Amino acid sequence: MNITLIGLGYMGLPMAAILARAGHKVHGVDINPAVVARVNKGECPFAEPGMSELVAEAHASGNLHADTAPVPADIFLLSLPTPVDHTTHEADMSYVEAGAAAIAPVLKEGDLVILESTSPLGGTEVNVKAVVEKTRPELADKIDYVFCPERAIPGDTLREMVENDRLVGGLSERATERGLELYKTFCKGELIPCTAGEAEMVKLVENASRDAQLAFCNELHMVCDKLGLDFWRVVKFANHHPRVNIFTPNAAGVGGHCIAVDPWFIVHSAPEIAKQMRATREVNDSKPLWVAGKVREAVRRMGKDKVTVACLGLAYKPDVDDLRDSPGAVVIDELANDSNLELLVVEPNIDSWRRPLTPLGEAIARADVVVCLTAHKPFRALTSRELQGKQLVDACGVWRHLDGVTNVI
Ligand SMILES: NC(=O)c1ccc[n+]([C@@H]2O[C@H](COP(=O)([O-])OP(=O)(O)OC[C@H]3O[C@@H](n4cnc5c(N)ncnc54)[C@H](O)[C@@H]3O)[C@@H](O)[C@H]2O)c1
């Protein structure tokens, strides 16, 4: 198949490379010329296991080419950002609408358009089909539209993109059938036919459900601390129950482009009813500020006029370079209000940030207080000798096992 794929980001580029490996001719499109240039050199612009090799292979095979503009194809895939407006909690579908407007001029009768971006209920119809038909009214009912949400996880994207089960939801039965035919060419997981609306809602529900589990663990962490109980032991003991599975945090809060965002799309569509989902978001958003409070507690214990705090981890989860909705950044921005603090920021997975970054060894050597904001591997490997004499704010429970260190949490 000739496929034009719009949006070569964390999800779009792996999908483009997988489709190219499956033998399709993929024309990848991105508005960022730097991304296009990297892909056309056979390089992956972000860190993801296996991607450097796969993009190089797809490029060398001649099946993957990138450009800044779409070309005619049989199938069009949209993998564009769908952030939330943090004031109104409404999905920002402007990127998807821009992508739909960009493909409209090159679409022809019989093409298949697939939206993979996480979208609110009705997104495929309203933000893609309607946008195409606004400029190409003659194509009404002559194009098939499918919603197929992406469920892969950064860090294991390539395996999950192929092995995960997928929902394939067409705006018509014929569209669903055509979508199934495409995903069959590379997907080893079960392909589940459904409606576009079901697929849109299920993707949101999956992330809202995980958000709720994380809010339970985050709230419990704060409650146990308030009551003077060891949260980690409470969770461990509770999880001995055969039907209980409480999470433990691996970051200072809930961030990233999915779990911290998608539940709002449901809340926004049914604000009077989705009370628990709203409360869940609020609990998770409050956690980084609570962690900042624990840092201030540790700082007070030092009893010094000027205290150096090493803040370890900006990525929203361990061992990735994705800083979107970073809970670590919320903690750092909050602490930046305190004039008695010198903040050293450590993030081994990126080269630069809006504040200077400090190498891990130097930050530990200079710090009075060390804060684990994301449980990256090098932070988990720190020894009691390296952390001796520091006040530790261990939001991710990575240093609990070390003897002779002072943990504030
Ligand atoms: N990253 C994840 O873990 C993940 C997982 C599952 C689902 N999703 C969903 O997948 C979708 C894409 O997410 P992502 O993480 O790949 O986003 P991303 O920001 O990494 O990538 C989006 C890409 O689209 C490009 N772009 C923006 N507007 C464009 C336009 N008009 N034309 C062409 N290119 C354009 C950007 O330059 C960027 O390279 C989102 O809806 C997201 O919610 C993401």
Image: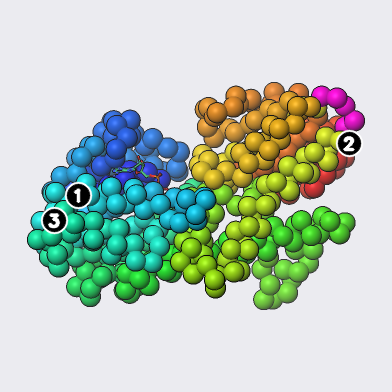
Image quadrant where residue 166 sits: bottom left
**How far apart in space, not on screen, are marks 2 and 1 (Cα)?**
60 Å
In front of the other: 142 or 27: 142
**How far apart in space, not on screen, are marks 3 and 2 (Cα)?**
67 Å
Determine the residue positioned at 23% across, 73% down: 172
Predominant SS of the magenta segment: loop
Closest to the camera, between mark 3 and mark 2, is 3
Residue 194 x %, y %: 33, 74
Relative placement, left or right, of 76 versus 234 is left
Kindly identify which residue carries mark 2: 301
Residue 306 x %, y %: 82, 24
Residue 340 x %, y %: 79, 27
Determine the residue positioned at 86% across, 35% down: 300
Image quadrant where residue 209 sits: bottom right
Determine the residue positioned at 13% across, 60% down: 137
Q: Earlier in the sequence, mark 3 or mark 1?
A: 1
Closest to the camera, between mark 3 and mark 1, is 3
- Asked if residue 39 can be seen in this view, the reply is no
Determine the residue positioned at 37% across, 43% down: 9
Residue 316 in magenta stretch: no
Establish if 125 lies above or below 297. below
For residue 136, the mark is 3
**How far apart in space, not on screen, are marks 3 and 1 (Cα)?**
10 Å
Q: Give the residues in magenta.
A: 301-306
Kindly identify which residue carries mark 1: 103
Asked whether the beta carbons under mark 3 and mark 2 sit within 8 Å of each other, the answer is no
